[in-house]
Amino acid sequence: MNTLGKVLIVDDSQLIHSMYRLVLNRYNGCRIVDAMNGLEALDVLSRESDFNLILLDINMPVMNGLQFMEKLKAENLYRQIPIIVISTEGKEEDTLRALKLGAWGYVVKPFKPHVLYEIIEKVIIKKSPFLEKLGSA
Ligand SMILES: [Mg+2]
């Protein structure tokens, strides 16, 4: 099994965090940090920026995923961290906005855990941006 390194999960649902952890725990030595909204995620990144992947929700209180990505884009330091946007928000304009802001992949909830696993493999391990929308498989 490949190693994945350090992953930041940004989602306002604790259930989603648990689900992602099940997938991420397949990777040896994967370290996971949790944030419940964009502002919390920025706070984490101000202290530690050496993440290998960010799993990002769009609809969150305080600061949503698109606002978070706009902030990141302004910070050169974080530009290199691959972001997979995973959101119930299936609106075409939000998909395009996320991709324009630099998302490596976009997945629509709900989906089965193996779908997330396959996207992480494509985007992070094989280093090819995954720019298709995927629904529940
Ligand atoms: Mg949400």
Image (tube, rainbow, N blue to C red):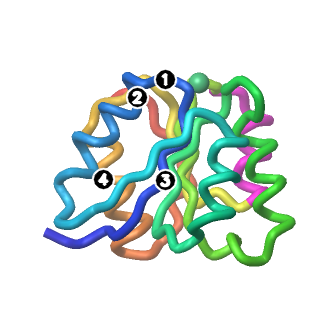
Report x, y in % for residue 94. Answer: 75, 36
Does 111 sit above or below residue 52? Answer: above
Q: Nearer the viewer, mark 4 or mark 2?
A: 2
Magenta range: 90-101
For disc 3, the neighbor class at 10 Å (few under 14, some 14 to 19, many from 20) is many
Q: Mark 1 and ligand 1: say if the CB distance to the nearest ligand atom is below 8 Å.
A: yes
Which structural element holds mark 4?
helix
Which structural element holds mark 1?
loop
Instruction: Kindly identify which numbered label has been placed on residue 33.
Output: none
Report x, y in % for residue 30. Answer: 28, 62
Report x, y in % for residue 44. Answer: 60, 55
Q: Are marks 1 and 2 in contact (CB under 8 Å)?
A: yes
Q: Main secondary structure of the magenta part?
A: helix
What residue is shown with label 1?
13
Q: Nearer the viewer, mark 4 or mark 1?
A: 1
Distance in Å between CA atoms under marks 4 and 2: 17 Å
Q: Mark 2 and ligand 1: say if the CB distance to the nearest ligand atom is below 8 Å.
A: yes
Q: Is residue 93 magenta?
A: yes
At label 4, the amino acid type is: Glu
